[in-house]
Image (cartoon, rainbow, N blue to C red):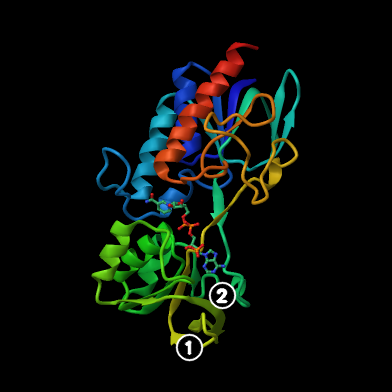
Amino acid sequence: MYDVIIIGAGPAGLTAAIYARRAEKKALVLEAKSYGGQIVNTPDIENYPVCPHISGFDFATNLYEQTKALGAEIVFEKAVDIINGEKEKEVVTEKGKYSCKAIIIATGSENRKLGVEGENELIGRGISYCATCDGAFYRKKTVAVVGGGNTALEDALYLADVAEKVYLIHRRDSFRGEEATLNKLKERDNVQFVLNSTVTALKAEKRLNAIEVTDKDGKVTEICVNGLFVAVGRIPETQNFGKTVELDESGYVVAGENCVTNADGVFVAGDNRVKSVRQLVTATADGAVAATEAVKYINQL
Ligand code: NAP
């Protein structure tokens, strides 16, 4: 019997485990893939206090080691269900069941697909969702990045160092991503902005070789590319928990800044929570808050 089970080993989940262990609670972290969550794909984090520059991978590895050193157990199994009993809770994984007193859902989010015909078939053959993972395959080649958030801007900047030419395609003419990153991109000679435009078709023989882009006036342009990096946002990974906690219409877990859900003893932390700012710093903050609330809950049982 664990005091707390944390579902997800991203920045929110691992921070929650640190706080749970420092409160001397027996903590288990369950992770479906690998530790670190989406931040491992960020080449250079520049907006986390005290670290002017750190790679997402190094950040995640430091956090993972810190969590393990504090005595949290980390098991790589996908949680598929929660059984929220009155006295005892259970997290069901693909391999078994673990019981606990409190649960923190910190499952983050997954890549949103572009939704263009042929996208799935071309993954690994020209379509990628991770510039740091796949960028090196496009050395001295031509790539496009689609999206207007921080991920798209950071991916385009990273690829500008690797590829011969980078097109940044965005459906509007203003960006959600940070101004500072946008300004750095504007200084790059090999980055071309394609604004008010969406990718409407993918052209391929064995691999992607061109994309069709349609602007807001309906004008269609074909752009020859070797790779297309899709960075059009994320969707919360909460599908398995909708019968336990309330989700909003987009699938985010409904909870305020205290990370307390509508289900007794079940808390949420990170990008899968309804919130206005989804950043590394708010994810780790959520982890601290959720664990503190979970500890309070356990102590009054
Ligand atoms: P995001 O901020 O949600 O941006 C998604 C972008 O994709 C938006 O510009 C959106 O356009 C566009 N888009 C959505 N669906 C589209 C479609 N079907 N076709 C074309 N374009 C589409 O997602 P994100 O950039 O992945 O970032 C997710 C969160 O992580 C954000 O809160 C971000 O700030 C954070 N993040 C932080 C860091 C960091 O702190 N260093 C790094 C990366 C990400 P519209 O703008 O028109 O809606």
The residue sitting at 35% across, 43% down in the picture is 59
Mark 2 nearby-residue class (10 Å; few <14, some 14–19, many ≥20): some
* Residue 200 showing in the rendered view: yes
- Say which quadrant the N terminus sits in: top right
- Asked if the beta carbon under badge 2 is closer than 8 A to the nearest atom of ligand 1, the reply is no
The residue sitting at 38% across, 67% down in the picture is 135
Q: Amino acid at mark 2?
A: Leu
Task: Check disc 2 and report the residue beneath it.
Answer: 122
- Say which quadrant the C terminus sits in: top right
Residue 83 falls left or right of residue 301: right
Task: Pinpoint residue 158: horizontal percent, then vertical percent.
Answer: 32, 64
SS at circle 1: strand
Task: Pinpoint residue 256: horizontal percent, then vertical percent.
Answer: 56, 33
Q: Is residue 221 above or below residue 69?
A: below
The residue sitting at 43% across, 30% down in the picture is 67
Q: Is residue 256 above or below residue 292?
A: below
Q: Nearer the viewer, residue 77 or 20?
A: 20
Mark carried by residue 222: 1
